């Protein structure tokens, strides 16, 4: 004679299991899953396109469809024999479509080569840049105010010589060029002294 659980899983109609599962009967819910999941897994096998298999597999989609059904069990009304399998199959198809849409919205992942340089500074480069900037500020501080303004205008503000001529009221553009050249040489001298 078969034990009680095999009778429950094999002989009780699905509609009765659904009615019991709606009341919170865990045994009936387990019986529904054990009855529906194996044939659904067999049916779903191979339906998930290979492009989508990186993030999901068939078992994931079947499990998701089953959980969705269990959440909606109170509203599920089987209209015919096999209605639950039909519902689950449609749910699997919908999940596959959703996954394909999601993949279609994202570019495919690519492997980055190890030798690809980073656009970020290494810690050493950052330290050197910080040290160089501190030296620049120190050397800039040693310049006369007018030279400091000319260096900042030309190097940091990237003003052209005509702009410097106009802003600093030099007599000619060439006079502005000469004054900036001298200020930059004084800065270079100050930088070399601070090493």
Image (cartoon, grey):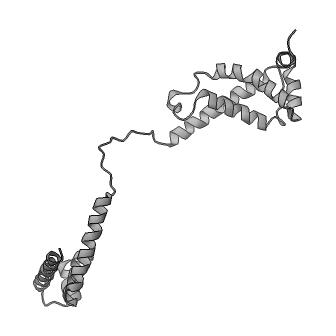
- With respect to residue 113, does 82 lie above or below? above
Q: Quadrant of residue 37?
A: top right
Q: Residue at x 82, y 33 (%)?
A: 76
Nearest the eye: 48 or 37 = 37
Residue 153 located left or right of residue 38: left
Quadrant location of residue 123? bottom left
Say left or right for 6 vs 164.
Answer: right
**Rendered residue at 30%/49% (across/down):** 117
State whether residue 7 appears in this view: yes
x, y (%) of residue 146?
Answer: 20, 89
Residue at the (84%, 36%) spot, across then down: 74
Q: Does residue 63 sit above or below 135 in this rendering?
A: above
Q: Hey, which residue is sitting farthest front in the picture?
A: 195
Where is residue 81 drawn, in percent x and y?
82, 19
- Give the percent coordinates (x, y) of residue 70: 78, 34
Residue toward you, 135 or 8 = 135
């Amino acid at each position: 004679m078969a034990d009680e659980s095999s009778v429950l899983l094999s002989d009780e109609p699905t509609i009765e299991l659904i009615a019991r599962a709606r009341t919170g009967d865990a045994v009936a819910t387990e019986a529904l899953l054990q009855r529906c999941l194996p044939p659904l897994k067999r049916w779903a096998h191979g339906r998930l396109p290979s492009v989508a298999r990186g993030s999901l597999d068939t078992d994931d989609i079947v499990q998701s469809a089953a959980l969705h059904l269990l959440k909606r069990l109170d509203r599920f009304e089987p209209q015919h024999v096999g209605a639950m399998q039909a519902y689950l199959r449609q749910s699997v198809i919908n999940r596959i479509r959703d996954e394909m849409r999601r993949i279609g919205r994202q570019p495919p992942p690519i492997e980055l080569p190890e030798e690809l340089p980073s656009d970020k500074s290494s810690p050493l480069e950052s330290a050197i840049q910080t040290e160089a900037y501190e030296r620049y500020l120190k050397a800039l501080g040693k310049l006369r105010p007018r030279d400091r303004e000319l260096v900042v205008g030309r190097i940091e503000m990237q003003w052209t010589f005509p702009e410097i001529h106009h802003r600093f009221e030099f007599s000619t553009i060439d006079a502005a060029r000469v004054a900036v050249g001298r200020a930059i040489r004084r800065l270079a001298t100050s930088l070399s002294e601070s090493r």
